Image (tube, rainbow, N blue to C red):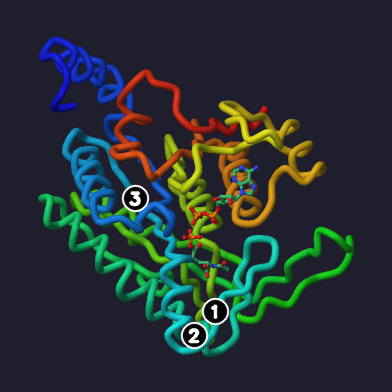
Amino acid sequence: MSDLEPKIKAEILAEALPYIQKFHGKTIVIKYGGNAMTEEKLKHGFARDVVLLKLVGMNPVVVHGGGPQIDNALRKVGKSGTFIQGMRITDEETMEVVEWVLGGEVQQDIVMLINQYGGQAVGLTGKDGGLIHARKLQMPDREKPGEFIDLGFVGEITSINPAVVKALQDDAFIPVISPIGFSDDGQAFNINADVVAGEIAKILKAEKLIMMTNIPGVMDKQDNLLTDLTAVEIDHLFADGTISGGMLPKIGSALEAAKSGVNSVHIIDGRIEHSLLLEILTEQPFGTLIRSH
Ligand SMILES: Nc1ncnc2c1ncn2[C@@H]1O[C@H](COP(=O)(O)OP(=O)(O)O)[C@@H](O)[C@H]1O
Ligand SMILES: CC(=O)N[C@@H](CCC(=O)OP(=O)(O)O)C(=O)O
């Protein structure tokens, strides 16, 4: 932006006004994927953007991932990450690493940066305020209908109690949520962060859900960006194998949220600096918009 003519700079800033008005007081759930937080510069840009959104009157809620960061920590203890249908197989030792990495290092890094830029972030896991109740996931096998895959300590959400998030929002704080759920007997479960973001957006009746990842959006088989997708089109992409790996839970959760009344759901490239501001405060079409119909 520093290379732009002053007039163009002013026009871009003025373009933000209707969006600031439209989204004032509205909840914006941001899924901050582990792949979009690998560079220092990007992390700082993200933190500044979140603070700006809060200061202009929106209610950002961050749900973070950390897949690559968990992989790094596992490598240090001689283990490697294995995924099935975009979900990590999580044995007991892996679960300990997941809790330690997501609930510790990754979350604290985001909280510190947001606070450094003048925000008031508070880190939460599913345990805090009974936020995320979970049980062991029975994951349907996409290749063998009727059969299930055992992923160990991977959880599915049974309920969300959003009271703690609402209280923090009302008190000018920015919640930063780790995707770890707990059963009634205190067992921790590893939950895909896209799934948590989708459910949090649903229960908070968010205006927007923005999933920041490491690709321009949903791509077709020829690697062209699909700017806009409906439920029917998504069904086709699932059926013909265009969507695989980490995009499976992401697009599934995005569609669920769109069907449940979240007004706009986007999958965007988190590797572009200030992608969050571009999506929310400018007219520029960005990434993939997921529609319920
Ligand atoms: N059709 C598709 N369009 C875009 N990405 C896809 C598609 N199918 C599979 N993917 C994969 O999904 C990845 C994004 O999911 P994931 O690695 O879990 O990211 P994140 O850490 O941001 O949640 C992409 O980098 C890409 O490798
Ligand atoms: C069950 C499962 O797969 N959990 C994820 C949780 C972190 C996550 O979702 O991180 P990203 O958003 O960076 O992919 C994992 O263990 O990697």
Q: Secondary structure at mark 1?
A: loop
Q: Image point 65% across, 52% down: which residue? A: 248
Q: CA distance from mark 3 to mark 1?
A: 23 Å
Going by the image, does 266 lie left or right of 273? right
Say if disc 2 is inside 8 Å of ligand 2: no
Q: Amino acid at mark 3?
A: Val
Q: CA distance from mark 2 to mark 1?
A: 5 Å
Say if disc 1 is inside 8 Å of ligand 2: no
Residue 272, image x and y in percent? 35, 39
Within 10 Å of the Cα at label 1, are there few (<14), some (14-19), or many (20+) other Cα atoms?
Answer: some
Sequence-wise, which precedes: disc 3 or disc 2? 3
Going by the image, does 231 lie left or right of 93? right
Say if disc 3 is inside 8 Å of ligand 2: no
Instruction: Say the numbered circle drawn on residue 170.
Output: none
Residue 83, image x and y in percent? 64, 69
Q: Read off the residue under disc 2.
A: 186
The quadrant holding residue 35 is bottom left
Sequence-wise, which precedes: disc 3 or disc 1? 3
Tell me: residue 127, above or below residue 251: below
The quadrant holding residue 288 is top right
Does the CB distance between marks 2 and 1 fall below 8 Å?
Answer: yes
Tell me: residue 286, above or below residue 94: above
Q: Read off the residue under disc 1.
A: 183
Q: Secondary structure at mark 3?
A: strand
For discs 3 and 2, the disc positioned in front in the rendered view: 3
Does the CB distance between marks 3 and 2 fall below 8 Å?
Answer: no
For discs 3 and 1, the disc positioned in front in the rendered view: 3
Q: Image point 40% across, 59% down: which residue? A: 64
Q: Read off the residue under disc 3.
A: 61
Q: CA distance from mark 3 to mark 2?
A: 25 Å
